[in-house]
Amino acid sequence: MSNDYEKDVRRMLRLQGGLTVLAFLAATLIVLCACSGCGQLDSIMPVINNDTLPLVAPVVAERPTVNVPYDLRQENWLGRQREGSCTWATTISLLRWQGRYRKADWVRKNRGDGEWPEHMATGLDSAGIRYAYTTEGDVEFLEWACRTRRGCGITVKGGAHMVALVHLDSQWAAILDNNDIEKFIWVPRDALIAEWRASHGWAVAVLYTPCPPLPQ
């Protein structure tokens, strides 16, 4: 191989190497421009205007807080003494809401008729059901029961009936009446509290874990 030929080959290799380096540098520059939002790329990657971005949906609290599904609601029934079983019907709905289906079934088969606080407490104790109650018209008890999404039974109609309190906020309350389980009944907060206190202020809550909130 002649010296002139060897020189020509070396020159060609240097030229190819230089072109390779240039190509590499050009590719790198393009990538860097794309990553930094270079102005020359606006035609293919337009700047996003924040005003056109979709708004994030606000978090909406479930209403009512204790949103007992229809299939878990227990209707009132006549007990062995031919009395309404509103206290037990309310308790069953709240037990089911908190996932205690076997206890709810046991109550339905073994309890019934009208109740008063001390006698019902004895019945809950014998059934091994955890509970808390007040007979003093303590509004904080109602707020706690709804805040923890357990709900509670409350007396109305002068103490002649018990319904489930399923919501209580600064303006509104909602109840589930075991005499009409088709819908929740919304009542102004102050009116509900006044009715409850005029009906002996008895409230009872079962103490288990409620269903998780529905996605909003």
Image (spheres, helix red, strand yellow):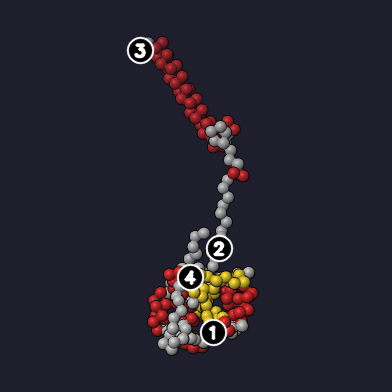
> In the image, what residue occupies the spot 48% across and 66% down?
212
Q: Which-is-in-front pick, marks 2 and 3?
A: 2
Q: Are marks 2 and 1 in contact (CB under 8 Å)?
A: no
Q: Earlier in the sequence, mark 4 or mark 3?
A: 3
Q: Which residue is mark 1?
A: 160
Mark number displayed over residue 182? 4
| Residue type beneath disc 3 | Met
At mark 1, the secondary structure is loop
Q: Residue 1 shows which numbered tag?
A: 3
Q: Is residue 190 visible?
A: yes
Residue 78, quarter of picture: bottom left
Which of pointers 1 and 3 lies earlier in the amino acid sequence? 3
Ranked by sequence position, the earlier of labels 2 and 3 is: 3
Amino acid type of the residue that numbered disc 4 sits on in the rendered structure: Glu
The reply to whether callout 1 and callout 3 are in contact (CB within 8 Å) is no
Name the residue beneath numbered marker 2: 61
Real-space CA distance between mark 1 and mark 3, rounded to the nearest whole angstrom: 117 Å
| Tags 4 and 2 touching, CB below 8 Å | no
Q: Which residue is rendered at x = 52% and y = 77% of the image?
A: 163
Q: Quadrant of the N terminus?
A: top left
- Give the mark nearer the N terminus: 2 vs 1: 2
Residue 199 image point, x, y percent: 59, 83
| Badge 2 element | loop
Q: Earlier in the sequence, mark 4 or mark 2?
A: 2
Mark 2 to mark 1 CA distance (whole Å): 32 Å
Q: Amino acid at mark 2?
A: Ala
Q: Nearer the viewer, mark 4 or mark 3?
A: 4
Question: In whole angstroms, how far apart are the C-alphas of marks 4 and 2?
Answer: 22 Å
